[in-house]
Image (spheres, helix red, strand yellow):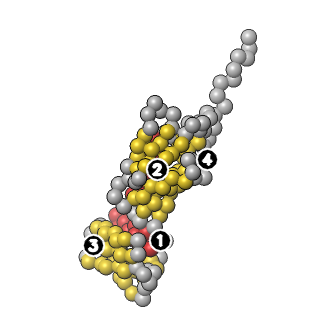
């Protein structure tokens, strides 16, 4: 039995879960999420909890059991509290500025890079070196943050670039210089 899959998903009082076959709709104070789950995976709802049930012990069913539980749990957390991913800009002259919904990044290129968020995502700049990506869909928040990081990944010699908050960049020593003459 999947250790993750067998855990019940607690449903907050302000969150509503509607199960219609393999389609699950989760509504909460932050918004609404709808997801189609694989055939065979079923859900049982009782006393403020949802339990994910798999039909058999085949390899595919076991693999989808924990995944389905995690996806549904992320939907419930997302509509209740939302998700945030924070990015840091490190480097001389690297800065971010807010322009309405968009964020302009000055990260060492000859031009500023403009990032426009997809629907359901809010970008917020704190100071000039932090960008917060907020939304209710964990998968989309992570993907937008990864796309922003891809604009200028942290490089290993000086550590300049866009990184996640708390990310450690492995540094390299670089050249030894003019030794041996």
Mark 3 or 2: in front is 2
Numbered disc 1: secondary structure: loop
Task: Measure how far apart labels 1 and 3 are at the Cα level.
Answer: 24 Å
Q: Is residue 90 visible?
A: yes
Pinpoint residue 24: horizontal percent, then vertical percent: 31, 73
Q: Label 2, on which residue?
A: 98
Are there few (<14), some (14-19), or many (20+) residues within 10 Å of tag 3? some
Q: Earlier in the sequence, mark 1 or mark 3?
A: 3
Question: Front-most of 37 and 56?
Answer: 37
Q: Position of residue 84 (x, y in %)?
A: 49, 61
Q: Is residue 41 visible?
A: no
Badge 3 element: loop
Which residue shows up at 43% across the image and 49% down it?
Answer: 99
Residue tagged by mark 1?
81
Q: Residue at x 26, y 77 (%)?
A: 20
Report which residue position mark 4 lands on: 168
- Measured in 3D between alpha carbons, the distance from the residue under mark 4 to the one under mark 1, in whole angstroms, is 27 Å
């Amino acid at each position: 039995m999947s250790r993750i899959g067998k855990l019940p998903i607690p449903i907050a009082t302000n969150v509503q879960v509607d199960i219609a076959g393999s389609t699950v709709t989760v509504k909460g104070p932050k918004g609404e999420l709808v997801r189609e789950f694989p055939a065979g995976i079923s859900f049982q709802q009782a006393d403020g909890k949802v339990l994910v049930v798999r039909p058999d012990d085949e390899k595919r069913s076991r693999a989808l059991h924990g995944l389905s539980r995690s996806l549904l749990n992320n939907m419930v957390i997302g509509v209740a509290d939302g998700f945030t991913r924070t990015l840091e800009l490190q480097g001389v002259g690297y800065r971010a500025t807010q322009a309405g919904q968009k964020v302009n990044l000055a990260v060492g290129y000859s031009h500023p890079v403009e990032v426009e968020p997809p629907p359901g995502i809010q970008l917020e700049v704190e100071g000039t070196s932090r960008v917060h990506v907020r939304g209710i869909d964990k998968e989309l928040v992570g993907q937008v943050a990864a796309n922003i990081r891809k604009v200028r990944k942290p490089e290993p010699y000086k550590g300049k670039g866009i990184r996640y908050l708390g990310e450690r960049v492995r540094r390299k020593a670089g050249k030894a210089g003019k030794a041996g003459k």
